[in-house]
Amino acid sequence: MKVKPEDSLKIENIVASAKVTDYLDLPELASKIDGAEYNKKRFPGVVLRMQNPKIAALVFGSGKVVLTGAKSLDSLSKGLTILGNQLRSFNIDIPKKLTYKVQNIVTSADLATPINLNKIAVGFNLDRIEYEPEQFPGLVYRLEDPKVVVLLFGSGKLIITGGKVTDDAKKAVVKILADLRSLGLM
């Protein structure tokens, strides 16, 4: 049985932010955590790489944290909990319940058939697309609802970025399919 494109979705990366405290002493923090990366000249935060879940936490002196690399909302929550517990172990006042805000969900999908980007570029709403094959091999399609950017490739592969909830990618694929079918390109 063939997989429907909207069922081929795979989360590649979730980026989220959180506020864990009001101030963090980054040099001290970096010296206490094994594997912490801190080079103030190159990046203004401490980079902590977790293995399970495989997530990077970018920790800033303001107490803000950016989590990246998560493949699910569950692993994002788990990563934030691990970070909170680690900071508490250094007697840093961290709230018991930490919450994050999703900034971006990057998802891939597969239409399972090659597509003609030149025909799509001509048929789609021109003020919503960018297609310069000599600059970039994909067609950039900016959707309004959901508010995401979809990269379409001739292979039929899609990358959906800018989503705030996991359902945004599915809605985007359904919309792209409808647009392609209405142009007779699917």
Image (tube, rainbow, N blue to C red):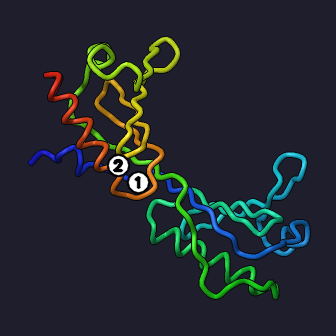
Q: Amino acid at mark 2?
A: Ala
User: Which numbered disc, 1 or 2, marks the residue closer to the eye?
Assistant: 2
Frontmost residue, 13 versus 130 = 130
Q: Amino acid at mark 1?
A: Ile
Asked if the residue under mark 2 is in contact with the one under mark 1, i.e. CB atoms within 8 Å, the reply is yes
Residue at 68% x, 85% y: name it: 95
Up/down of 61 relative to 123, above or below:
below
Residue 118 horizontal/vertical position (percent): 31, 13
Residue 153 horizontal/vertical position (percent): 36, 27
Q: Earlier in the sequence, mark 1 or mark 2?
A: 1
> Would residue 100 be found to the left or right of residue 172 on screen?
right
Residue at 35% x, 44% y: name it: 145
Q: Which residue is mark 2?
A: 169
Frontmost residue, 141 versus 44 = 141
Q: Which numbered tag is attached to residue 32?
A: none
> Would residue 145 be found to the left or right of residue 99 on screen?
left
Q: Residues within 10 Å of mark 2 (few under 14, many from 20)?
A: many
> Would residue 105 be found to the left or right of residue 17 on screen?
left
Q: Which numbered tag is attached to residue 11?
A: 1
Q: Residues within 10 Å of mark 1 (few under 14, many from 20)?
A: some
Label 2 residue SS:
helix
Residue 71 horizontal/vertical position (percent): 46, 59
Quadrant position of residue 144: top left
Locate the C terminus and report the quarter of the image it occupies.
Answer: top left
Residue at 36% x, 46% y: name it: 146
- Separation of residues labelled 1 and 2 (CA atoms): 9 Å
Label 1 residue SS:
strand
Up/down of 88 relative to 14, above or below:
below
Residue 148 horizontal/vertical position (percent): 42, 42
Total marks shown come to 2
